[in-house]
Amino acid sequence: MRYKALDSSFYIENRKKVAGEIAEKSLVMLTSNSEFPRSGDTTQPFRQNSEMLYLTGIDQEETYLAMAPWHPNVEYREILFIKNPSPEMVVWFGHRLSKEAASQISGIKTVKFTDELEDILQDLMVNSQDVYLHLPESPRNRLEPITREHCFVKKLRKEYPLHTFRRLAPILYPLRAVKETEELSALKTACDITTKAFMRAAKAVQPGKFEYEIEAELTYEMLRNGASGHSFAPIVAAGEDTCILHYIKNDKIMNDGDLLLMDFGAEYANYAGDATRTIPVNGKFSPRQKAIYQSCLDIFKETIPLYQPGMTIHKINDYVFKRMEEELVKLGLLRKEDIENQNPDKPLFKKYYMHNTAHFIGLDVHDVGQRDWTFQPGMVLSCEPGIYVAEEGIGVRIETDVVVAENPINLMPDMPVEIDEIEALMAK
């Protein structure tokens, strides 16, 4: 394991919180993420679903969690099912968790192999009235493949048609949105590694190099500092591609006079960092680049203090959208009179700023949470204003991760963001 595991008490408390929210005599059943094939004899790197990680910490395929707090058999009130680490499997695929190791990580006393699931499941269902299941409910997470979760839900509904099935997400998602001390520590480590990666990559940028060479610098520094890798596919975009919001080809040459936009983040202990910096390829901003960058930076710095309890993403957006109009006028991109007469359903600033300013961050880089949720202390969100002037080939985005508090906490305070800081870093 590359990272220091969170203490088992964290997972124990998470399960207690869920048990306190479900209906009496109910059962919670959760299964792990799918493995996806890459070619005939290999799979894509496995990534556990965040719900299983939040409740057990078990980062291994073919895992099931059963929670039946009212079961008459005390040993069946929490059961973790794991893959049987047979000698043959270990020869081919390496270490898998033993029952003892899985119990130590999760804090679950009853650990069994998955080949015992069917017999025990019958007992669990007979002693339960309602069954809580999970399928991803994020509006941005519409998976086309049929996953292990989908198959498991379909199986239970078919085999036990007289039970009442309920959604786990409305209970689990609000809990996941507020980060505990252990989670904030993991997120801070992810952000510290992200900062180190930027410092290395920025020094390597120069005209004539390819974008993927800078991606390699980011990756190297993340891995050498204990991250499992990128928390999402990194964006390393130069020139006109700085105006493509989700550009991930990273295959073009960086030219003298270009800006380079890097949107990236390290993943540590399954928690995601997420940062963006925009820097000049030749080490010096042109006057126009500097003006656009400074407008974006002013909004960025003004917005972080707004991440206080009681706010929402909608309220953050309202502030940023208004400020964006003001800055775009200063930059000569919009006129006041046009803004006054614009169609409110199609605001003019959207030509230059197309996305939202914040999203929740945690076990997923776009973590659970909706735009109308009221901020609570301990929530973590991105702050990422941007200005994209496609006709000039100039795109600027600046991003950090912020902990909601009376005095909001920037998790990447040491990552250079001022113009003179960036130019001094690149001169080294």
Image: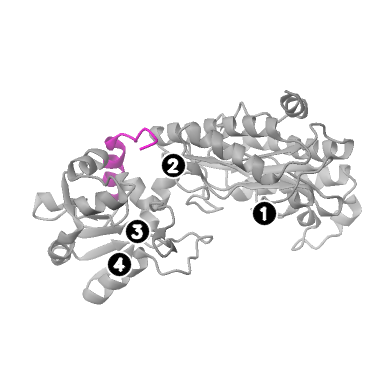
Q: Is residue 125 above or below residue 240?
A: below
Q: Is residue 9 above or below residue 19?
A: above
In the rendered view, how is the structure colored?
one colour
Q: Which mark is residue 124?
A: none
The residue singled out by tag 4 in the image is: 152
Horizontal and vertical percent position of residue 367: 49, 49
Q: Which residues are magenta?
A: 1-18
Q: Is residue 299 above or below residue 426?
A: below
Disc 3 residue crowd, few under 14, some 14–19, many 20+, Cα 10 Å:
many
The residue singled out by tag 3 in the image is: 168
Q: Closer to the N terminus: mark 3 or mark 4? A: 4
The residue singled out by tag 1 in the image is: 247
Q: Secondary structure at mark 4?
A: helix
Q: Closer to the N terminus: mark 4 or mark 2? A: 4
Going by the numbered disc 1, the residue's amino acid type is Tyr
Q: Secondary structure at mark 1?
A: loop
The residue singled out by tag 2 in the image is: 178
Residue visible at 90% across and 51% down in the picture? 335
Residue contact between numbered discs 1 and 2, judged by CB atoms under 8 Å: no
Q: Closer to the N terminus: mark 2 or mark 3? A: 3
Q: Secondary structure at mark 3?
A: loop
Horizontal and vertical percent position of residue 58: 31, 46
Q: Closer to the N terminus: mark 1 or mark 3? A: 3
Disc 4 residue crowd, few under 14, some 14–19, many 20+, Cα 10 Å:
some
Report the Cα–Cα distance between label 4 and label 2: 28 Å
Horizontal and vertical percent position of residue 46: 40, 53
Residue visible at 55% across and 33% down in the picture? 221
